[in-house]
Amino acid sequence: QVQLQESGPGLVKPSETLSLTCAVSGYSISSGYYWGWIRQPPGKGLEWIGSIYHSGSTYYNPSLKSRVTISVDTSKNQFSLKLSSVTAADTAVYYCARALGRFTMVRGFDYWGQGTLVTVSS
Amino acid sequence: QSALTQPASVSGSPGQSITISCTGTSSDVGGYNYVSWYQQHPGKAPKLMIYDVSNRPSGVSNRFSGSKSGNTASLTISGLQAEDEADYYCSSYTSSSTLRVFGTGTKVTVL
């Protein structure tokens, strides 16, 4: 059974960089699939942030692209999110997820982490 | 790229059927068969309920079904049960630079 678990600081100061890691168990990232980050501001809807293939190829939401970096560490079987210059608008629950279908990212996400709340505040 | 449009709320009595609509454009819902639906209970992660417009993942009840007509996709829940009360989001691949767009979300209430 594939399991994903987000980790990282729950509080980040404005203008600083938000950093989260998603640890994957039950499947080796190096074997394939796209892996993504999705966020949900309190009381609001879902927003796709970006996705990465096991080889390191990345795709980002253009609205966040200038501030986002997603990377993968196959040796640790995990992938990470960095979001720079954060503001209160970046306060959200951040989810990591696996894309449905081994070689594509167009079909949605089948496995999700439990999510982690990140609050941006001084 | 704007979010896909869903009704804010839909309600029904136990045993009834309800349908949630998800309206997009020819660049997303209407152009590709890559619509997925997610169920989200309060404080929980989204759960994939339908993928590729009408396919159910293993373990999802056959009371959930999906369809599409033109630029609008639909999720139907038949035999409504108390456990179906949750938020539901549609999502689609889009040919715009955004690549993936989610719906505005629908709160389903079981009366």
Image: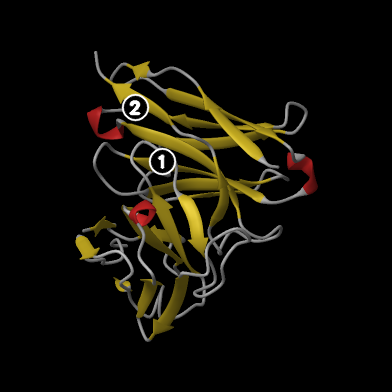
Q: First in sequence, mark 1 or 2: give its number.
A: 1
> What residue do we see at 75% from left, 41% from top?
A27
Q: Is residue B88 above or below residue A1?
A: below
Give the camera-side residue of A13 and B37. Answer: B37
Tell me the residue that label 1 is attached to.
A66
Tell me the residue that label 2 is attached to.
A85
Q: Which mark is residue B18?
A: none
Q: Position of residue A82 (x, y in %)?
A: 48, 30
Name the residue at the top extreme: A122
- Residue B89 appearing in the image: yes
Q: Position of residue A70 (x, y in %)?
A: 55, 37
Q: Secondary structure at mark 1?
A: loop
- Residue A84 appearing in the image: no
How crowded pointer 2 is (Cα within 10 Å; few <14, some 14-19, many 20+) is rated as: some
Q: Position of residue A45 (x, y in %)?
A: 30, 49
Q: Is residue B74 above or below residue B50?
A: below
> What residue do we see at 24% from left, 65% from top?
B13
Q: Which chain contains the residue that carries disc 1? A: A
Q: Which chain contains the residue that carries disc 2? A: A
B111 left or right of B91 in image: left
> In the picture, which quadrant includes the N terminus of chain B?
bottom left
Q: Quadrant of residue B17?
A: bottom left
